[in-house]
Image (tube, rainbow, N blue to C red):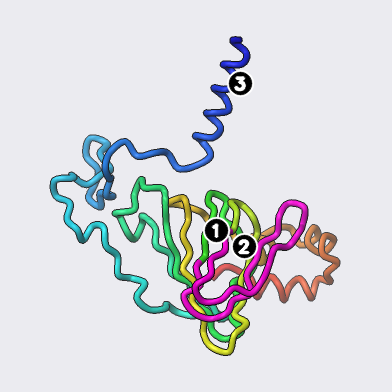
Amino acid sequence: MYLRILVLFFLNSYVTLGSDPDPVQDFCISNIEPATNNNHCKNSSTATVEDFVYSGIKSSGKFGSTGLSAISVNSNIFPGLNTLGMSFVRADFEVDGVNVPHFHPRATEIAFVLQGKVYSGFVDTNNKVFAKVIEKGEVMVFPKGMVHFQMNVGDTPATILGSFNSQNPGLQRIPTAVFGSGIKDELLEKAFGLSSKELSKLKKRFAPH
């Protein structure tokens, strides 16, 4: 009996620790002023509707070399999200634009196609690929921690809106993590069958900016 209770306790603890903690108040708007008495929340009596509205994703941001523009909306730039266990992203794709394989270690993502046609998918831990072209109005989910990717396969620009079940989902792009992180050259050459010249090109291309 006691063993059963102990097992249930640890299972409940595992589930609880597997996501952002539940808030213990209506909201906790991040306090941008120096915290006093360890209070990291803005006084709720001074909150206004503007604390819960963000206008920074009305249009696309700056496009990178892969034809992708991504604007993250998290509690760092939208204090009203603090402690609510969620965040957001707007991703715009030029024609043939790519969101390179990447993953979010702390969140599941739901992606909604606002416009365009996007080849979208993820790879599970058995290296099985789940991918298809999704179009305007369709939604795809990327399970927590799974490597996923997107590419605009239409003739016009595409836009995706993504929602995460964590206020800090984290992001690791596979090419940058492998070739731009400072892993020893000898290991990468052996792991990928690359010459030192080929590796040098990849490291230069994916070096952090």
Under tag 2, what secondary structure?
A: strand
Q: Which residues are magenta?
A: 112-141
Q: Is residue 23 above or below residue 208?
A: above
Q: Residue at x 43, y 64 (%)?
A: 72
Give the residue number, with chain letter if any, for mark 3: 7
Q: Is residue 63 above or below residue 107?
A: below
Under tag 1, what secondary structure?
A: loop
User: Where residue 53 sits: x, y (%)?
Assistant: 27, 62
Q: Which mark is residue 171?
A: 1
Q: Residue at x 23, y 35 (%)?
A: 37
Q: Is residue 192 magenta?
A: no
Residue located farthest toward the bottom when viewing the structure as drawn: 155
Disc 3 marks a residue whose amino acid type is Val
Question: Which of the 4 image quarters holds residue 89?
Answer: bottom left
User: Where residue 195 sits: x, y (%)?
Assistant: 84, 71
2 and 1 marks in contact (CB < 8 Å) = yes
